[in-house]
Amino acid sequence: MRSVAFLLAAISLLADAAADTCGKRYTPAQLRTAPVDEILGVPLAAEAAYRVATIDVVRQDIFNSDDPAESKALFRLANLWHINTREDVIRTLLLFEEGDAVTAARIDESERLLRRKRFLYDGRVIANRQCDGDIDVAVVTRDVWSLLLTAGVTRTGGKQEFEIGASEINLLGTGADLDFEVFENLDRDGLSLGFADTNVRNSRVGVRFRYEDTDDGQSLLARVGQPFYAYDARRSWDLRAQESTRNRRLYRRGQEIATFAVDYKLAQASVGWSKGLVDGYANRFNVGFTIEEQRLDPISGIEGLRDRAFAYPWVSFERIEDEYAKTRNLDRVQTTEDVFLGKQFTALLGYSPRGDGFLVGSTSWRDGWRFPKDEPSAGEREGLAPRMNVLLYGLQASGYWNAHTKRAENVVGSAWARYRHRHTPRLALHLDAQATVTDQLDPDQQILAGGDSGLRGYPNRFQAGSRRFRLTAEERFYTDWYLARVLRVAAAAFVDVGRAWDSKHDNDVLANVGVGLRFESTRTDRSLVYHIDLAFPLVDGPGVGGAEITLTSKRNL
C-alpha cells in the first residue's frame, strides 16, 4: 500500500511540474488590462527554433477602464467612439503564422514592426507558454485615438506657420491614413489631401497618394510597391510618379534674395531581390529606371539657371545588420524605443546619356554602439535599460559626374554623430553633431543655417553657403509627470553652435543657449513630440533679437 501511495504521489508531483512548465504565464483577462510595457514573455533560447502552436491577439483600448485613474466618463467615451485596430491587420504585420517555426529574433522583429505604426502606442509579441518545443504566442497592442482635428501653429526663427485640418491615421481600424489640411508655411500657402496604406487588403503592398494646391502651383505624388518589409524578405518592387510646379527662393541673412519657378517631373520603377537574413545581415539588390526632369525659370534676382533632364537605368546595393536595443527615455518620454545599432551600407549608381551624359551616384554608411557592451538584464530587454549609453554615427554623399566636362556637379557630402550619456534613468546628456560640404553646386542650390535647421536662437535661413556645421549639447530630464493621463513631460537645457559659409561669405559662428519643455501624447499619434523652446543668441547679427521662442512638433526629442 505504501508503494502504491508513493507512486501516486510521484505521479501527482510530475503532473504539477508539467503544469508549471507548460502553463500560460498570462490569462486573457490579465493581458487585456496589464500595462503593455510591463508584459514579459517566457524566456526563449536565442538560437533555438520553436513551433508556433497558437497566436492570441489582444487589442487593448486607448484607456484602461479597470484602472481607477482612467475610469472617467470622457475616457470611456473615447474608448466607445474609437474603432480599435482590426485583428487581421495586427496578424498581417507578424512575420509568422500558426504552425510556423520561429526564433526569438523573428518574434522580436515582429514586435518592432508593430511599434513602427503610428496608430499603436505600444506592442508586445511574447511566448506566453513554452512546452516541448511548442509555444503559444500572445500579441498585445494598445491603440491611440486616431481621428485628429488639428489647428496648430509652428514658430521658428521668429516666423509663424499655421495649419488647420483633419486626419484619420487608422481608418476604420485598417491602418490606412487619410488627411486633409489647409496650411501657411515659410514657403507657400495652400491645401493638401493625402492617403496612405502600407498593407493594402492585408498584403505587403503599400500605396501612397498626395495632392497639394498652393498659391504658387500644384503637386501630385503617387506610389505603389512592396518594400523589403523584413530582414528575411526576398523580393521588393516600387512604382513612383511625381509632378509639381512651385516657386523656390534663395536666402541670405534671413531675407529672400532670389525667386525662381520650378517645374519638376519624376517617374521611377524598380525591383529588388535578396537571399534574406544570413549570419545576422541582409544583402539587398535593386535595379531600376528613372526619368527625372527639372525646368527652372527665373523670376527675380537670379540668372544662369540650368534645366536638368535625366533618363537612366541604375543598380543599388544595401547591406544591413539585424542589431537593435530596446530602451526608454532616449528620443521619447517614457515610451518603448527600438534603437537601430547595426551597420548599414547603401550605394546607387546609374548613367544618363541625355545631354552631356551623366553618372548618377549616391552612398551612405552608418553604425551604432551601446555602452556597456555586456549582456543586458531581463529587465533591460523589456525596455528599461538604465545603464545604456548610445553612440550613432554615419556618412552620406551624392552627386553627378559630367562625362563631357570631366568634372563633378552638385556633390553633397555629410557626416553626423549622436551620443547619449545617461547619468541616471531620468537624466541624460545628448550630443548631436552634423557637417555638410558641397562642390560645384548649381546656382539654384544652397546650404542654409538658422532657426529652422537647429540654431534655435536665430532667424530662419539666416546664413547660406556651400558648407555647414552644427553642434548641439542638450541635458534632458525625463519627468514622471503624466498630465491628465495623456501627456508625458520632459525638460531640456541646451547649447546650439553652427555656421554656414562659402568662399564669398565668411559668416560668423553662431551660438545660442536655451531651455525648453517636451510633451508626448500617449493617447494620440505616437510619431510626434511637441517642443517649446526659449533660446538666447550669444552672437549678434542683422535681424537677431534678444530671445526666440520656438514651437515645433518633431518625431523625437
Image (tube, grey):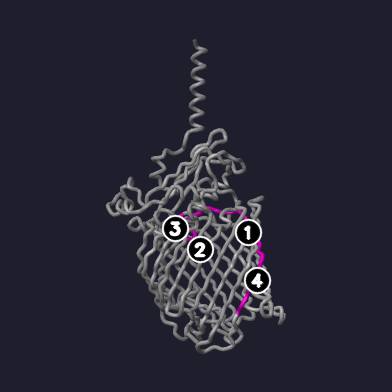
Amino acid type at mark 2? Leu
- Which kind of residue does numbered mark 1 sit on? Gly
Which of label 1 and label 2 is nearer to you? 1
Q: Position of residue 30 (x, y in %)?
A: 40, 41
Of the two numbered discs 4 and 1 on the same chain, state the one appearing first in sequence.
1
Prevailing secondary structure of the magenta residues: strand
Q: Is residue 324 magenta?
A: yes
Circle 4 SS class: strand
> Image check: 442 left or right of 40?
right
Inter-mark Cα distance, 4 to 1:
17 Å
On residue 176, the disc is 3
Residue annotated with mark 1: 272
> Does residue 501 lie above or below 31 as drawn?
below
- Residue bearing the label numbered 2: 429
**Residue 236 is drawn in which quadrant?**
bottom right
**Which region of the structure is painted magenta?**
308-335
**Please, what secondary structure does the residue beneath circle 1 have?**
strand
